[in-house]
Image (cartoon, rainbow, N blue to C red):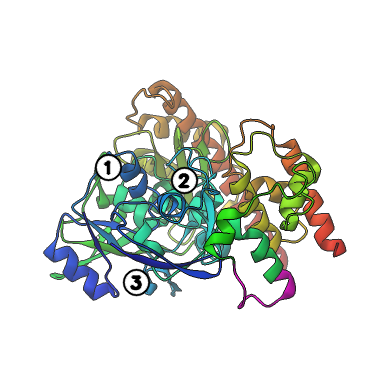
Amino acid sequence: MRVNFTVNGRPQEADDVWEGESLLYVLRERLGLPGSKNACEQGECGSCTVRLDGVPVCSCLVAAGQAQGREVVTVEGLADFAKQRACGTGSCGGTSLDEAKRWEADGTDSQTGEGTELAPIQQAFIDAGAVQCGFCTPGLLVAADEMLERNPNPTDADIREALSGNLCRCTGYEKIMDAVRLAAARQSEGV
Amino acid sequence: MDFLRPASWEEALAAKAEHPTAVPIAGGTDVMVEINFDHRRPEYLMDLNRIGDLTEWEVGEDTVRLGASVPYTRIMENLDTELPGLALASHTVASPQIRNRGGVGGNLGTASPAGDAHPALLAAGAEVEVESVRGARRIPIDEFYTGVKRNALAPDELIRAVHVKKADGPQQFSKVGTRNAMVIAVCAFGLALHPETRTVRTGIGSAAPTPVRAKAAEEFLNAALEEGGFWDNGKIITPSVAKQFADLCSAACNPIDDVRGTASYRRHAVGVMARRTLTWTWESYRGTRRAAKGAA
């Protein structure tokens, strides 16, 4: 079947989609957006987290056909999504599929993120050293960004709860907590 | 596989009548796991997300009509006064991502003994509104669970809503797992005080082939509370009464040994949760009585 939906602010079409296919599979294998990670395929790990009509969900548990006509934001579009939100526009722009496919956190300096357009939460993860192997990072970024949108001054308990559906097997979460606190502090200072 | 996409409830009922093997999918948090792991290859997958009224709820005089697909997040945020037990249970479901998608209709459809909503529904008192092209009916929650992952639905029926009695007293929910998030209950317990009828209702999860009430424990406690005049005098529940109640709740279990826990552990834990939830709710009841007296 064919699925038409909006990904990172631009209309997309996926063809020959199998009826039992997940949104995650469509994003990764049909649209070439491998940012959302495929790990557990059962909603345990959160590494496939995307926004579906604004709501964070595990894309591995959304049937592709259920995304028909709806809006999806993936980690590849997060920088632009955050920018739109900051400008208060939200209707224009978006990230094209080509731009999204080319998107990398490297820039001119992969250690600092310099030279790349990053969402504040992405910059905070780099600055706080919250990334190790990186596999859980996309899901954490999407989940953390959504929490900061809803709750600009989170307590540690709020952060822990918001990220409780995202597993990280490297960091022990402390640096991730630091990163979200840093992003919240920068957000409230308007940096 | 065919993907059915009914735009209205009537279309969904017609599709289900035509294809009784169609598997309804709403939040997808159970169904997609089975499909991803190739445990299930339904002939038809029927998306219910386009039926808007399934995600709505109405607060009535005595009950809340909760649409089958109202996500757990909405229940936690909006119905914690009317349905405190279910709101607590909803908060223990998996993770934010799952709570944003999953709802009580899916819990009922899957009818796993470990579903988090069941003990709260049993304790509060509820009816499941189901419908087919043949008509609608309401199934009392006590008659809904018929076996391990089996329920009273006919093949052509769909779950439209659940009517849950609004709380007339304190309610609690307790769940045992290895951590707070992303846990399938080792066992769970729901308890609701109903001061208007002077009764207590319970619900046990994941400690029998189906979710069950501890009816003998309820009867014992109802009689003990009545006999001691507890509802009127608001005294602390006698430890021996609480102990007997807990033991009877343990005895209501019919658990198995599995990867999550042993049968004997489940029986023990249910007793502990029964005693604790009784103490918490009773303390809260005594508190509101005192506050009401102070105001008067």
Residue A191: x %, y % from top left: 86, 62
Q: Is residue A156 left or right of residue B95?
A: right
Q: Nearer the viewer, residue B131 or B165?
A: B131
Q: Is residue B59 left or right of residue A98?
A: left
Magenta stretch? A85-94
| Mark 1 secondary-structure assignment | loop
| Mark 1 lies on residue | B149
Residue B211 seen by the camera: no
In the image, residue B181 sits, relative to residue B288, either above or below, namely above
Residue A2 position by quadrant: bottom left
- Circles 2 and 1: CB atoms closer than 8 Å: no
**Quadrant for the N terminus of chain A in the image:** bottom left
| Mark 2 secondary-structure assignment | strand
Circle on res. A171: none
Distance (Cα) linking label 3 and label 1: 25 Å
| Mark 2 lies on residue | B190
Kind of residue at badge 1: Lys
- Nearest to N terminus: mark 2 or mark 3: 3
Q: Chain of mark 2?
A: B
Residue B67: x %, y % from top left: 38, 67
Q: Chain of mark 3?
A: B
- Nearest to N terminus: mark 2 or mark 1: 1
Q: Nearer the viewer, residue A47 or B253?
A: A47
In the image, residue B1 sits, relative to residue B218, either above or below, namely below
Q: Nearer the viewer, residue A23 or B189?
A: A23
| Mark 3 lies on residue | B51
Q: Nearer the viewer, residue A70 or B200?
A: A70
Residue A115 position by quadrant: bottom right
Kind of residue at badge 2: Gly
